Image: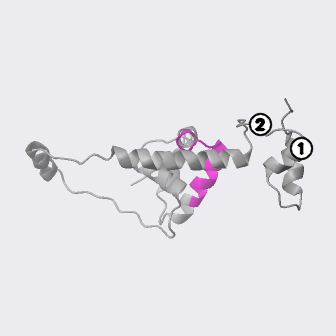
Amino acid sequence: MPSALTKEEIMQWRRSTEKITLEEYAQRLGKSIQSKKETHDLHDLFLKKKDISEEIEQIQAAQKPVEQKTEQEEQEEQQKPDREVSFDFKKKLNKREEVIFNYFRENRKQIVSVKDLANLLELPNDYVYKYIKNLRAKLAGDVLTNAEQGGYILNV
């Protein structure tokens, strides 16, 4: 059984100016391509997140049941004051910023830690800080503030 391609050989293939597939390159060397190997480089993390985000969207679309309100719920709703908060954005949010913003909106006036957001996005903490910075720049007004104990609070 031939051995599998090493990372160095794959990098040589990527740098090569020849227009051949990785399978052809491996065959030329008399080696095989290793089936899926879990790595933690940015390319693999990005592809993994892309697949997961598509699955999440499909699951969320499937889980939206048709809501049927009972008479009692309708009466309770009429008794509550209608207080909807609208947010103005300077620019359109991307998908991850929307996910972060929706999480902040659900946990309004509560401390949200970077660790929670990193788990939500399944990204390292360093990336979360970037998305929070971008979200603050796109939000009109100073509604996303730092908490004294650490984390962030959506003040609305």
Viewer-side residue, 47 vs 90: 47
Residue 109: percent from the left, percent from the top?
41, 46
Label 1 with label 2: CB-CB less than 8 Å: no
Quarter holding the C terminus is bottom left
Q: Is residue 39 left or right of residue 82?
A: right
Q: Amino acid at mark 1?
A: Glu
Q: Residue at the location (86% across, 33% down)?
A: 2
Residue 11 makes an appearance in the image: yes
In the drawing, does residue 90 fall left or right of residue 122?
left
Prevailing secondary structure of the magenta residues: helix
Tag 2 residue: 34
Q: Residue at x 27, y 45 (%)?
A: 65
**Which is nearer the N-term, disc 1 or disc 2?**
1
Q: State how far apart marks 1 and 2 are (Cα).
A: 14 Å
Residue drawn at 8 percent across, 46 percent down: 71
**Secondary structure of the residue carrying numbered label 2:** loop
Quadrant of the rendered image containing residue 4: top right
Q: Which residue is mark 1?
A: 8
Q: Amino acid type of disc 2?
A: Gln
Tell me, yes or no, whether the highlighted magenta stretch contains residue 128. Answer: yes
Q: Which residues are drawn in magenta? A: 119-134
